[in-house]
Image: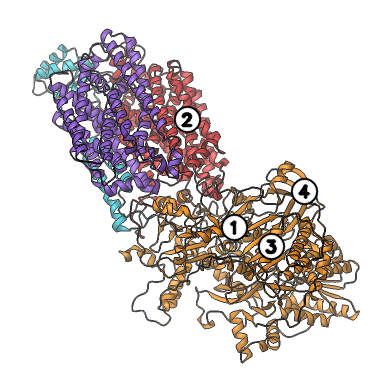
Amino acid sequence: MEQKYFRSLEELKLDVRPETDNKPLGDRQFIFEMQQELKKSTTASRRDFLKVFGFTVASAAIASSCEQPVRKAIPLLIQPDEIVPGKASYYASTFFDGIDYCPVVVKVRDGRPIKIEGNKASSLTQGGTNARTQAAVLGLYDNSRYRQPQAAGKASSWEEVDQAIISQLNAIKAKGGKVVVLSGTIISPSTKAVINDFLTQYPGEHITYDVLSASAMRHANKLSFGKAFIPAYHFDKADVIVSFDADFLGSWLTPVEFTKQYSKNRKLTSGEKKMSRHIHLEGAMSVTGTNADKRIQLHPAQEKQTVAALYYELQNLAGESGTKQIESPVDVKAIAKELYSKKAKALVVAGTNDAETQLMINGINQLLQSYGNTIDTSIQLNIRQADDEKVQQLVADMNAGKIDAVFLYDVNPAYDYPEKDKFVSGLAKVGLKVAMPVVEEETAPLADFICPDHHFLESWNDAQIKTGYYSLAQPAIRPIFKTRQAQQSFLVWIGSNLDFRSYIKQYWESNLFAQSDNLTFTGFWNSKLHDGVFESGQKETEVLTFDSNAALQAQQNAKSGNADQMALVVYANVAVGTGKHANNPWLQELPDPVSKACWDNYVSVSPKLASELGLKEFDTVNVGNIGELPILIQPGQEYKTLSVALGYGREKAGVPATGVGKNAFTQISFASGHMQYVRYDVSLEKLGGNYEVARTQTHHSMEGRAIVRNTTLEDYKQNPISGNEIREEIKKHLKTLYPKHQYDGFHWGMAIDLNSCTGCNACVVACSAENNVPVVGKEQVLMAREMHWIRIDRYYKGDEHNPDVVRQPVTCQHCDNAPCENVCPVAATTHSNEGLNQMAYNRCIGTRYCNNNCPYKVRRFNFYDYNGADAMKGNEMDPAEMTTDLRRLVLNPDVTIRAKGVIEKCSFCVQRIQEKKLEAKTENRQLRDGDVVPACAQACPSEAIVFGNLNDKDSKIARYYKDERNYHLLEELHTLPSVGYLTKVKNTTV
Amino acid sequence: MYVSPIREPLIRGEKNYGQVTKDILAPMAGKPSKYWYLGITLAGIAALFGAWATYQTIYYGIGTWGLNKTVGWGWGITNFVWWVGIGHAGTFISAILLLFRQKWRTSINRSAEAMTLIAIACAGFFPLIHMGRLLLGFFIFPYPNTRALWVNFNSPLLWDVFAISTYFAVSLIFWYVGLIPDLGTVRDKAKTKIRKAIYSFLSFGWTGSARHWSRHETVSLILAGLAAPLVLSVHTIVSFDFATSVIPGWHTTIFPPYFVSGAVFSGFAMVLTLLIVARKALNLEEYITVTHIESMNKVIILTGSIVGIAYITEFFMAWYSGVEYEQYAFMNRAFGPYAWAYWIMMTCNVVTPQLFWFKKIRTSLVATFIISIFVNIGMWFERFVIVVTSLHRDFLPSSWTMYSPSLVEVGLYVGTIGLFFTLFLLFIRVFPVIAIAEVKSVLKSSGDHKKTAHHE
Amino acid sequence: MAGIAMVAIGLVALVYGWIAGLEADRIYANLHLNSFYFVSLGLIGLFFVAVHSIAESGWQVSMQRVGEAMSLFIPVGGILMLIIFLSGGMSHLFEWTHEDHLDHILLKKVPYLNQPFFYVRFFVFFAGWVLLAWLIRKTSRQLDMNGDIQYFHRLRKYSAFYVVFLAITSVVSSWDWLMSIDAHWFSTLYGWYVFSSMLVTGFSMILIFVFVLQRMGYLKQVNDEHIHDMGKYMFGLSIFWAYLWFSQYMLIWYANIPEETIYFYERLKYFDTVFYLNLIVNFAIPFLLLMPRNAKRVYWIVIPVAAIIFIGHWLDLYQLIMPGAVGHEAAGIGFLEIGLTIGFLGLFMLVTFWGLSKAPLVPKNHPFYEESLHYHTNY
Amino acid sequence: MNKDYITAYYNDEDELLKAVRQLKEKGLEILDVLTPFPVHGLDKVLGMRRSRLTRVAFWGGAVGAAVGFFFQAWVFTEGYPLNFGGKPFFAVPSFMPVTFELAVLFAAFSMVFAFLIYFKLGPGAKTVIHDERITDDRFLVVVGIRKEGNQQEIEQALKETGAEGIKHNA
């Protein structure tokens, strides 16, 4: 019967093979044949598959139209001669966009990169990613990419452009003019060398401009240590973490790495009942703040005073006297005690770009013996290299006509420079302006020449994120358009014959090969290219000694600001960040981890202030002349703190980004030389309008239901079941009127550790990318029709003014007694014999009955033709232009595109399960625990999601299921979910 | 048959059999009145609105409606249940009242059954149009196919397919079998050749033979016996659509009988709405008398009270269950964002029908008409309350949403109302609106000047 | 007389139960079962009169005295019930009376499930029933004595009051006396299910009384036609009962939510025989035997079926009460159960016959009496 | 009815009943009685036996129920067993609705078709219309002429019962 059961599926699933088939190619041969067969078959029911297949062909056509060959890019897992159509190849690479750094592995199918995963070989990120890294693959297929060089706004060719630029450069050089390369932070040593070469030939200056600046921190370190640098942080080694507005899980320095570290020290699944304690002081609500064990509201104006007071308390504890008593706006005595008791295992960080505050933080860390323990000064971070004063100087120089040529590489100051008008007017006075953008932007059209850069997936590159931590990037696709990598352009302009790949190789051979233990350079190069990363273990050699004078001086100077004035904070959210990726529909539709809003920025206002000013949700206001923005009442926001996300209000970008939200960069000011992300001189003007912000969650209370279960570490130590007591009661009553079905082979299950989930949303984007989840646009989200297969529910608990925040990722629970399956009239959703709740899209007629009957509401309905798969033409609903031929190249051919009128939902990445089963079969072995990893679990930087076979008693998932913290959502309904949750534990131990 | 003298006569005026024939056939003869034209124009316009909405839905998708990820059913299914409910009166009158020997049914059963059929047609439209992929809707039938895949017999929607189509088919033959002798009458009274030919075809060659009559009665009776449980089963199965689920507010065991009585309740209200107008417009006041209206009003009190008790039972049980989801669902109904709908429902369904306890109101045509409209509205809101308030806030508050209909959904509803009246207006021109033979058979015992002599 | 002998058997059974050391739970549960059962039959007897009065139907007039007489048992049963409750039955029957051992669910129900309120409801039910029964009987007698049409209207009014009152109280009383035995469990349909069960039994009981009276030489006016109609009632109501049974079972089976399934889980596991027997006896047998038209006119089919229905719904009540009140270990059907039921039946018969003897068996002046006499049915 | 017969009508069903009884007593062969509505007691007078249509309905219903139940059971246990929400394959309660509906459907249609076919009634059926007022207000008897000469006797008998419009078919 078992055979008959899947009779009709046998033709599609590839794991059935005649016994006698012993051909060496085995299943791969079979796949190939299947491919041929599928090509031949032209039945209407496979229309969608063929469409996807058509794109594959299209992509090949596009790829072959490009002249530049890919040479010897070495795939990670499979040797080139083994590339088989229908099988993915993986290439190691590096994602760095000036803010986020992540070593990655790029999945390439039929010549198209379709997915980015974290690179497990990196000891920093260990395979973790964040939302922007996950979404970066879609940037490759951005509709608004520059497709060829332009001169004076007209399409041109590389030859013409090069000739013109070189002759102008020579002219400038001849008259002794100044050439400036303005770039974002560059962590690539080879690129730096190229720019150096360039500026050697054409004398000038390389100026780094960071949108999110850490210039004050570098400055503070210069005063404390005599060197402007950023040290390496070790959140995993800290038992107490105190953060002053440092959003280290979202946007501060290297959040992926920090999330990894942070979660490592907060996991309770290893058996050890120990976790770090995290105290967070901030004004606006950040992702990091919502994850803290204790979150203290602090008006930004009082931050400096508070830090000074904390410093003072610690000095007292350390027996260092002499400073005068400092009053603190919030109680820091307890914090000081806690910190001091964990001396050498404590870490204090601050996110502010105020040098004095950073100095005091240094002093505090010194007192706590953090240096050498939780902060490593011998390994230095290379990001955020900008010196804000230099950028200001540049703008002044340009306006003064002192600059003759400017090369804009990886920057968009006409959009994001705080005084962008000044920049634009200055730029106009520069004789030669060359922009090297990837996608349409505000600055490039102001340049004389646009020399479009490759997308990073088309480029060769290297990176050194920290001292001794190198990684490589290699192209995963031939360039789609007539673009040229910026570094190559620099090389061309200095008349070099080298291509940049060879340049990197040379650089590595001469600078890095020595640090390795490889015998030959080729061996070194090939293995590092394969791994993607090279961790040499090298450290900074100079000895840094701490000088506390500056810190003490700063403490003396610290004055409390006026907490009665309104503070406007601008911040980078986890989705569009600084606006560089604003044109990425996946990121635009990504709900903010705190507010659950997407497709807009808005002014977050505390409930108290809102009621005081008579403001209702979505009333429009003008704050600090940003323009008309709606307000969003944000529980937990400090009384007088307003906050607005950066990255919106793009004026010249593609369809998804342009006109979405307002540009908040204008609110940044240069105080004491550093960019300040908070200002106090703002007034809030009520405009009387109303503008609805799309949110994926509109009800924020759990209504007292045991949905997200939580406890405190103290209680947990006493009784591991605490917070989850109700489960015993529920389990006692779990009676059924019919016996459970048996799952003999696999029984797939997932467990989610609520203690680890930070709400970063990487899983949401990863899932969208893996499963071709459509983007529906703001209007549809407003109508509550977003399509995400995994969502992160966020609930507030307790006081609305300072609530506890809990989160819960929810996907299809794959219930063994699924209420949805029962009610489908056409048997479109059934249970597999591996415990999967499966959807047959081509059988679905769209009654939405399953969706109604799903207690978890995880099913999604294609209300419109979101992806052009409908049989009728002209009825697409594609506000984000996701159905252009270019955008479609990102589609995963292993996952069907769903037509209008069809229900879809999480499949536990069944395509990955099948692939791994097939692989195991080909290798004639059992599937191992951990072989199958769904996209969400793979993306997660905190390893919150575990997937595996419940029948395998030794598997990680089985261990999680045995944990006392494990529970199932709405278990009392006897739906028998295959997703477990581990209780969230807060460390309230003082 | 002996009839107690204290009973009210059912047919007014000095009538003989010939007069009965003449009176009842009168609306079919001659040119329609201008009111008829006005009515069918208005109904036609409404139906066209529905056609536009249908096009929008099929071409652009369900996205043209106001539904969302949480509320998967809205006006569409509300209308479906409402129409099915209305479609219960006809068969209830013909079948159950026949079994209970309520003679007053004879004057109203024909039009009520016609109304039933039209209402089921309107109802059946909604499950079809609410499908995301209407063109593949045939998947719902268990037909042999190359994939050897059948359908899911566990699904209440599938049961609906069987129930609604069986109900329609059986109601149709029940209605038509009853019509055959009357079509014979129309045939024999026809003035033109074409008319004669058509009705001769439609009347199946009816002669009025005693043997035919005898078997015809048997057939009618057995059909009534079959239709009675069928009526119960149809709304029971419709109620299963909700009650089998796990959603608080949907899953409750009282639904089957409560839906059935609600259906009869709304069906009778619609019959009253129609007949109060029709008896006037068609000069049938002597056949459809105040006694008929009063009897129907009594059924309204009965079923309305059952529905009321069910509402209260549900509410009490939600509290009594101690299940927080249940409790919340009902508090949300009564005091949540859709409380207005709940209180309209309560007022129209529970309060206003109780006015019928007063004989003055029960026998007043104006009052009856107004209350019948109230009940129609109230029963629509009952379904709206059940469908929407249960869904929009269920288990996980993170998914809670609000729902409001789009113009397209309004169009579909108005469209079916237009279709309903169009077909009903055509029906009164084409078929006798009262069962002629049945009225004749009770004329002697229940006529105004009853002949007291009884046979046997 | 037979009735007294039967009552004696009942007493013997009770004493036997006490002497044999059967669990008090079991004895109380049986007393409760029977008092509820026969009170319900009394209520349905009156309902038979009332509902036909409102519907202005005439055929039943010749046997309506039986229904009226059955209603006399209501106060008798009420007193018995009160004795059972007050003599300690409450704590044996109802888990929720153990106020010290309530879990969080039962604590939530205390505003409803508490003894004072329980007794208030008890007295309201019985006061209403007894009063309306007395009024209906009185008016019916007056109508018979002087045939004034005003009594006919008054009878209709009282009947309407009774039907409305019963509609509410039968539901609520079934929650109080039956459903709260399984105090955690709930089902919105429960009240109507119990009512349908009692309805079909009550009508069968009327038929049995009519049969007995005819055997004794009375009620000659009742002919095949009337029997036929009663047969149809039994047939139809048995189907209706099965419909409600199925509705409740199906919905709970389908959703499979533990808070509800626990009820059927216990019954299917420990009381499976009674569970299935219930369906066969109360649905399959009446359905199959009464389906042919002629069967409904034949005494030797109709009367045995009525008796089977009487036993069947006793079993129905048994499986409603025993799993919760007694538990599967102590429950059983033995001399105690049979004897007590015979005793109650005897008492019920004594009361009913006493009632019948107080008034003319035939309401000759009822306006529909003639109709009833000339009644004939074809199908 | 390719036989000779005489028709006559009455204006009232009670008259008709009386007349038919009398004609029967006289031993006349009443071929048919045509009435505008079913006249109670006429079937007894004419000596018709009870209808067998009930049996048709019963067996139709039984077949319908069996088809419904066993088809569903076959699909779920043998044809293509699928796991729907952990429900058993042999899910008897789930089969009930469809079983019931098919039983009613089969019963109703088998009976109605049996009725129509037996009497040869149907769309466009050719039947003799003796009098157009039969479907209005006349109650007509058709008396067969058994042998020559019997005609007078019949006409006489009809007149005695108050019949009007006595006609010979030929």
Q: Earlier in the sequence, mark 1 or mark 3?
A: 3
The percent position of residue A909, horizontal first and vertical second, equals 49, 65
Co-location on one chain, circles 4 and 1 = yes
Q: Quadrant of residue A109?
A: bottom right
Give amino acid for label 1: Val
Alpha carbon separation for disc pair 3 and 4: 43 Å
Q: Nearer the viewer, mark 4 or mark 1?
A: 4
At mark 4, the secondary structure is strand
What shade has chain D been given? cyan
Chain containing mark 1: A
Chain containing mark 4: A
Q: Earlier in the sequence, mark 4 or mark 1?
A: 4
Relative side of A58 to C176, left or right: right
Q: Which numbered disc covers residue B376?
A: 2
Q: Is residue A733 above or below residue B267?
A: below
Co-location on one chain, circles 2 and 3 = no
What shade has chain A been given? orange
